Amino acid sequence: MPAIQSPPGRILQLEMENFKSYKGHQLVGPFKDFTAIIGPNGAGKSNLMDAISFVLGVRTGQLRGSQLKDLIYAFDDREKEQRGRKAFVRLVYLLDDGVELRFTRTITSSGGSEYRIDNRVVNWEEYNAKLRSIGILVKARNFLVFQGDVESVASKNSKELTGLLEQISGSDELKKEYEELEEKKAIAEEKAALIYQKKKTIGAEKKLKKAQKEEAEKHLKLQDELKALKREHFLWQLYNIENDIEKANEDVDAEKNNRKDVMAKLEKFEHEAGKRKIEQAKYLKEIAQREKKIAERSSKLGKYQPELLRLKEEIARIKSKIESSRKEVDKRKKEKGKHSKEIEQMQKSIKDLNEKMNELNERRQDSSGKLPMLDSQLQEYFRIKEEAGMKTIKLRDEKEVLDRQYHTDLEALRNLEENYQQLINRENDLDEQIERMKSRQKEIEDSSSEYKNETTSLKKQLRSLQEKHRDARNASENLKTRIAELEDQLSDLTAERYENERDSRLTQAVESLKRLFQGVHGRMTDLGGMEAKSNKWDDKKIEGLMKKKEEYELELEKVGSIRDMQIKESEISGKISGLEKKIQYAEIEKKSIKDKLPHLEQEKRNITEESRRINVELSKSRAEVDKRNTEIRKLEKRINEIVDRIYRDFSQSVGVANIREYEEKQLKEAQEQCELERIALPVLSDAAEEEDDSDGPQYDFSELDRAHLQERRPSARDKMDAEFRQKIESKSSEIERTAPNLRALDQYEAIQEKEKQVSQEFEAARKEEKQVADAYNTVKQKRYELFMEAFNHISSIIDKIYKQLTKSNTHPLGGTAYLNLENEDDPFLHGIKYTTMPPTKRFRDMEQLSGGEKTVAALALLFSIHSYRPSPFFILDEVDAALDNLNVAKVAQFIRSKSCQAARDNQDAEDGHGFQSIVISLKDSFYDKAEALVGVYRDVDKSCSSTMSFDLRNYAES
């Protein structure tokens, strides 16, 4: 708000009726440009000032009354209680163009106020606006100084001076809004920080869930790959089984044909073996006969020597023949053994072929689900099946009940296992989350400790810098004071030198006149011996003072720039503030973690307890399932025994061990395994869905690679099967190693939605924070501008006014005064340092001045404030009470200089505005400078205050 330029004008006169100590209708005035109100104590001088304040809208509490009725004249308490009492004060204000404005404020009989302008009733807003238009600000009280206000200003500390300046500048009107917005800003910042921390936590959780989601997706992908691999493996196995069955059928047919040939050869070999046995018996019998003959003839050896020789030859010949026969027999034996082995091998081959053929038939029967039977056999089969069903119906009913109970128990078991696994997974998640939070908590504590240590270190630096700043400032002020003193001494010495030079010239002129003219005796000062020449100009002394001044100025340069120290202090303060915010955010996050940890640990304990409970139920459920399964197996065994007994003859007739072999071979097992592992094999058709006579589902092998459809040797097939199994095992191991959180897929979507929601909340909080911050900065800037405009104006003029109040013939330059802000960024939150240097004294703060010096300094401040918000008149109540005669004369002279018509006309003067002065004073050295006097006295007869006026302009000093 800029300084208000009040239009020229003044108070002409005052009318009162029954106001305070003034009874009846009284007219006071006319008031001149400088009017003094005088009178004895208790006469009613201050009540006259209260009357002016009252008509100008000042509140009752500031007029030494609790309510308006207290301001109405009353002789005694009885009169005070009378009804219908009224009072009014009318102020006649004369504008510069001669137009009169009449401001009237009446206390009604009901105790309220009535406002009038030129006898027209108006409301307070219009009344106040009119006063404002002529430069009278009621709230700022820029037109009056009550008794004691000077002492109050003189005793104010730096913060109270700031409050006074805020009131004058109007920035205090924004104080409430500023504080509310500051609080809202802090709340919005804290809210944004909390939501940011929440967003950060959710971001970390999202990152974790994303990793878990990717792991779960990878796990599911591996499962799909494993299913596809198993599907391919089973399909390849089925393809090979069907090929083997076809080849086996072909081999069976071929082996049947080969069996006939083998049997024919076997009969031939057996016939040949019989003939060889007969020949062998014949040769053995002949050998025995020959040996017998040898024995008989040996006895006759001597007799028959010649015969002996002949016989020896015969024996040798026979032996040779026997040897030949033996060799033939051995040969026949070997051939027999060989034929026996061949027969055994053939029988074994036949047995193997029969077994293989039976196995292939069984496998084919299993793969097709039907045994190739004749119509009569089918009819017999269905009859026996019906009979078996009738005989086992009770057992089957019992089994069906047990099956239902078994599946119910099994489903319950699966649910328990699933719940148990979910609890275990959740417990693992909680362990990881708790561990992460504890780790984060430790990180926060470590970083918070570092921040605190750094803050402590910076605060130490700041204190040290502040001490240096204070010392430097004191040293700077001290040096400036010394330099000022030296400058004063130099100025005095220089003036003395000029005066001595002038005296020397005058003395020479007088001597010349004495020589030229008779009757010239010299100057009066020379003749009377009154001249004081205590201070002689001394070049050496001036040189010494100049040298000392240069030394002080050099020391002042060494002290350094106070502004640089302030900037460094601000930088360190900014760092401390930033660290304290970090510590605050860390504490918020730490508190958040500290609040969450007990809940998570409690949840973990609940889950652990629930896991134990479910584990007990699992054990019971497994035992129940095993018990049901045992009972079902027993019933199945009994049913199978009955069925096997009924089917025994029929099974033998169709070439199977028992009727259940339909469901117990390789194809069935492969199909069951596919179903257990939920592997859907591709089929071209399904016998259960069609009404034709197909032998079972026709599988689609077109999905297999060409390499898998090629015929391979058993070793190559075993190698490929091993490769399949190795891949399946590798995939299974990889799946087992992952152990993912499969719920992470849903949890990730939930956390994404949560993150989106929190992001929206964060954006809203940031927007709200920005709006509040913008509003706060706007109000702060407005408050700052109002305050600084007033401060800059007052600080720029206070030194001139103080010099006018303190200058004299002895000290024509007067003293020095200036205002300093303790904080330039937020001046209205800190103090204002008011420092003055009375003539011949050092710079001192207000509290170090004497009573009179304090009063002069306070008046300088009040007049400076008045120059910022000038009113056309200034009413002062006993402002000279604490002043000595010399200072009273100075203040009176200052007020007279401001009250003269020239000063009032020159409203743009740099040293303050002119104004009409109405001053209450008890000192004649003050009021003798006034243009008019208003005497207040106590009318004893009427028991009230009365006034009289006296114009002093007719008695001005010539």
Image (cartoon, rainbow, N blue to C red):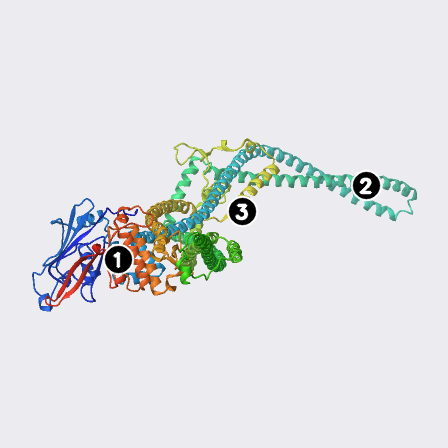
Check the picture and name the quadrant holding the C terminus.
bottom left
Residue ID for mark 1: 929
- Estimate the x, y position of residue 502 in percent, counting from the top left: 45, 53
Relative side of 876 to 584, left or right: left
Question: Which element is circle 1 on?
Answer: loop
Residue displayed at 26% across by 57% down: 929
User: 360 or 47, which is in the foreground?
Assistant: 47
Question: Disc 3 and disc 2: Cα gap in Å?
Answer: 75 Å
Is the residue 50 above or below the residue 340 in the image?
A: below
Most distant residue in the front direction: 518
Picture disc at residue 733: 3
Q: Position of residue 786 (x, y in %)?
A: 32, 49
Nearer the camera: disc 1 or disc 2: 1
Q: Amino acid at mark 1?
A: Lys
Which of the two discs, 1 and 2, labels the residue nearer the N terminus?
Answer: 2
Mark 3 and mark 2 lie on one chain; the one further toward the N terminus is: 2
For marks 3 and 1, give the CA distance: 113 Å
The amino acid on which the numbered mark 3 sits, given as a three-letter code, is: Ser
Q: Are marks 1 and 2 in contact (CB under 8 Å)?
A: no
Residue bearing mark 2: 323
Q: Nearer the viewer, residue 751 or 260?
A: 751
Mark 3 burial class by Cα count in 10 Å: few <14, some 14-19, many 20+: few
* CA–CA distance in space, label 1 to label 2: 186 Å
Whole-percent x, y for residue 897 in the image: 29, 53
Residue 574 point in image, percent of width and height = 45, 52
**What crowding class fits label 1: few (fewer than 14 Cα within 10 Å), some (14-19), or many (20 or more)?**
some
Mark 2 falls on what kind of element?
Answer: helix
Labelled pair 3, 1 in contact (Cβ < 8 Å): no
Three-letter amino acid code of the residue under disc 2: Glu
Tag 3–tag 2 contact (CB < 8 Å): no
